[in-house]
Amino acid sequence: MTKHIFVTGGVVSSLGKGLNSASIGMLLESRGLKVCLQKFDPYVNVDPGTMSPFEHGEIYVTDDGAETDLDLGHYERFTNTITNRNCNFTTGSIYNSVIMKERKGEYLGKTVQVIPHITNEIKECISKLAGPDVDVVISEIGGIVGDIESQPFLEAIRQFGQELGRENVLYIHLTLVPYLRAADEVKTKPTQHSVGMLRQAGIQPDILICRTEKTLTREQKDKIALFCNVDRGSVIEEKDVKPFLYEIPLILVEQGLDTIIVKKLGLKTNGHNIGRWLSMLEIMKNPQYSAEIAVVGKYIGLQSAYESIYEALTHGGIGNNARTRIRRVESEDIEKTSAVQHLEGCQGILVPGGFGERGIEGKITAIKYARENKIPFFGICLGMQCATIEFARNVCGLKEANSTEFDTNTPHPVISLLEEQRQVRVKGGTMRLGAQPCVLKENTLARRAYGMGSISERHRHRYELNNAYRERFASKGMVFSGFLPDGQLVEIIEIKEHPWFVAVQFHPEFKSKPINPHPLFKEFIKAALQVRS
Ligand code: GLN
């Protein structure tokens, strides 16, 4: 029978519920258990796909083409689970489903209400991940207790525990124990209040994970345990681990969290085996080499906008016994000044995915700089499209080449709308999304990196390289190294006469893990390490 863990948050948001859920998943896996993770987001959008990175951060894409919350990226990086569309639900998607059922007449004769219809729908979504081969489902509830939007989710997980039996369900609450400098004291009251609020909703947490910048004394932990009605040993202290977020599982393991969880849930397991994780951390903390990579984007001030990219670059470093230092470059700054001013001295340049015209010319200038100065270049999605435009303009002499996304009247639409997108008018969930097969050409950088001839990668785009220009590009030294198996779509381009210039139409960053770096990121960093800093 599948057991369930619910992770809630209190006091403030951004405490790292996603990272903690992922870490718990990793620790349970290290004990030989099969886990699945999911996240509930209380906002009303059906999915985050239509939100700007400024609003929401990166959109994480699953194999089955769901546009989801970036916490699912943490789940995949920390564990072996492969997420899917049942791993992220929002208030909007829950209501959408209930309203569609109502229109079909599935509740005929009934008044449709938050309780029981919305809460039942939430419980069904939790159950979707349970099954004979799954030991534990970890469900993270976004937002914090006390939010109006969270209430139906808390009621649903309360009912779920009641129905399944409390011995099969565990509630873990992540909370903040702030330090007040003026008083030189840590304060437990906000935690008491947030647990109080959970208990009002009928949920008694079993375990508290207390985020804190100061070490908690024994008395402080006892006080939290007593007033929150939690076992003394189940008050876990979690101090900040930046910049090594992969250390979170260690903090938890040192305080025996995995042992507490398996005991409380009555799970039969061996001890944990985290040897591989520890070796990875060792390299990460004491690497032999270092490479500086410039990421040229337009949400550079916002860490979460390129979360998976930054992580995959770090993994690529780990794979080469190196630290990846990331230089964040705002593409519009290049437009205002010059490429050399912002890119000089870096050992690799990456242009990530994106939408819309802002900052495009700066990205193209950065790519020209990488190509001409033979600096390793990695283009991803929009980054590949910009690389194509740059090549068309500056190598093939098609001065006004562009993507029709930015200039519908360009005389040289080297990037144009995918055929399948031409009739699409609705915005949500309608791009070319999810895993697609790709075949690799022999004797190319991509083929050598992957070490195999056919791969699968995740996509999220509407535009593609225009096949009408293929011959012209090839004659000037562009190599098409990856294709959709029918040959109709170019998925990877490279440039001859350059140490490492690879650009891909898909998003390899979503599949990179610290203990299994993505081959393209690993090779990119390897090439960067050849460049003198
Ligand atoms: N805007 C481009 C497209 O839709 C690139 C998308 C992306 O980088 N994810 O094709």
Image: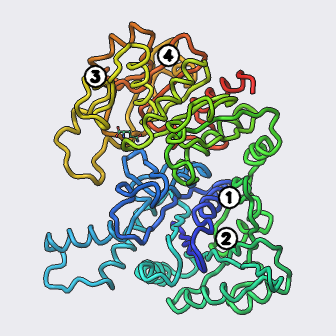
Q: Which one is in front, 54 or 107?
A: 54
Label 4 or label 3, whichever comes before in sequence order: 3
Q: Is residue 427 above or below residue 145?
A: above
> Does dot 2 land on a helix, a strand or a loop?
helix
Q: Verify CB contact (< 8 Å) between mark 2 and mark 1.
A: yes
* Residue identifier under label 3: 412
Q: Distance of mark 3 from mark 1, alpha carbons?
A: 53 Å
Nearer the viewer's eye, disc 3 or disc 1? 3
* Residue identifier under label 4: 495
Nearer the viewer's eye, disc 3 or disc 2? 3
* Residue identifier under label 2: 261
Residue located at (80% from left, 87% from top): 222
Point out the image quarter for the C terminus. Answer: top right
Label 3 or label 1, whichever comes before in sequence order: 1
Q: From the Cβ of disc 2, is ligand 1 less than 8 Å away?
A: no
Q: Furthest residue to the top? A: 475
Report whether 180 appears left or right of 47. Answer: right
Q: Distance of mark 2 from mark 4, alpha carbons?
A: 52 Å
- Residue type (three-letter) at the residue carrying disc 4: Ile
Q: Is residue 522 above or below residue 224?
A: above
Q: Distance of mark 3 from mark 2, alpha carbons?
A: 60 Å
Label 2 or label 4, whichever comes before in sequence order: 2
Give me the disc on residue 329: none
Nearer the viewer's eye, disc 2 or disc 4? 4
- Residue type (three-letter) at the residue carrying disc 2: Ile
Residue located at (81% from left, 73% from top): 214
Tell me residue 152's x, y (percent): 40, 81
Q: Distance of mark 4 from mark 1, alpha carbons?
A: 43 Å
- The answer to which image quadrant residue 419 occupies is top left
Q: Which one is in front, 444 or 413?
A: 413
